[in-house]
Image (cartoon, rainbow, N blue to C red):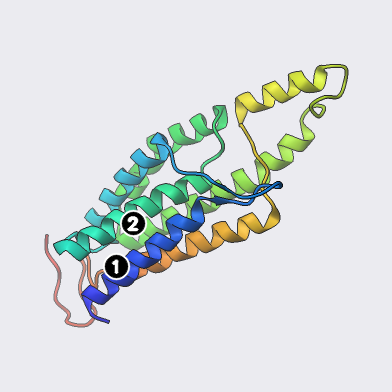
């Protein structure tokens, strides 16, 4: 594939990722959850870092800018999918990512950056789709029970995370969204990042 063809294919894959990441299969229907300010700002910083570290091809020409723009949109929607629900847990996770993970992302090669992102995505998925649902059903009485204690416990739980359950198939949709994001990233992956040697030509790329 030529560079232009890969950018077009990447833009389509990023669009599919953004569309799927927002779908939420709730028990009584289907919702679309658009990203918020937190995910949007983090996606902008992440897109800048991916381009600067050579994981995404630079935005050159109209097709290049379109691919980066759709990639930023898809990143924001995937972050909306992976970040915990609004509450104290989201604040703690966001603060932790901003303070500690950013230093790890900024150093090393682009392959290390992608590995760090994959590890972060795995930890966020475990927290949102495994830890929070278990704690939500185990901590305190259910709402409407216990002579009012259940309602009080429900209020406390929602301070920490405004959790809204999904059907099991909802996680499959989320996995497909992340897979499309990974495919698109591979399509815009340059042959060699600045400072790395191109395996085809043996020429070291400079800034």
Say above or below: 146 vs 109: above
The residue that disc 2 covers is 71
Residue 188 disc label:
1
Q: Nearer the viewer, residue 25 or 135?
A: 25
Distance of label 1 from label 2 (alpha carbons): 10 Å
Query: Could you tell me if residue 156 is visible in this image?
Result: yes
Residue 152, x across and y down, in percent: 75, 18
Q: Residue furthest left?
A: 207
Residue drawn at x 72%, y 25% as measured from the top left: 154
Asked whether, in this view, residue 19 is left or right of residue 197, the answer is right
Disc 1 is placed on an element classified as loop
Camera-side mark, 1 or 2: 2
Asked whether, in this view, residue 190 is left or right of residue 46, the answer is left
Q: Are marks 1 and 2 in contact (CB under 8 Å)?
A: yes
Query: Could you tell me if residue 54 is visible in this image?
Result: no
Rendering quarter of residue 59? bottom left
Say above or below: 117 vs 84: below
Mark nearer the N terminus (1 vs 2): 2
């Amino acid at each position: 594939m030529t560079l232009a063809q890969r950018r077009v294919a990447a833009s389509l894959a990023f669009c599919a990722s953004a569309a799927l990441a927002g779908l939420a299969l709730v028990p009584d229907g289907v919702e679309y959850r658009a990203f918020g300010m937190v995910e949007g700002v983090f996606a902008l910083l992440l897109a800048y870092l991916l381009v600067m570290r050579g994981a995404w091809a630079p935005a050159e020409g109209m097709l290049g800018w379109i691919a980066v723009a759709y990639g930023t949109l898809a990143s924001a929607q995937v972050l909306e999918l992976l970040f915990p629900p609004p509450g104290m847990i989201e604040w703690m996770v966001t603060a932790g990512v901003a303070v500690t993970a950013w230093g790890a992302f900024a150093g090393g090669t682009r392959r290390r950056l992608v590995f760090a992102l994959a590890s972060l995505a795995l930890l966020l998925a475990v927290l949102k789709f495994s830890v929070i649902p278990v704690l939500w059903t185990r901590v305190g009485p259910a709402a409407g029970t216990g002579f009012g204690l259940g309602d009080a416990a429900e209020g406390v739980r929602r301070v920490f995370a405004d959790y809204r359950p999904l059907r099991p198939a909802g996680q499959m949709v989320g996995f497909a969204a992340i897979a499309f994001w990974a495919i698109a990233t591979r399509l815009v992956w340059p042959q060699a990042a600045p400072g790395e040697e191109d395996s085809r030509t043996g020429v070291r790329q400079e800034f």
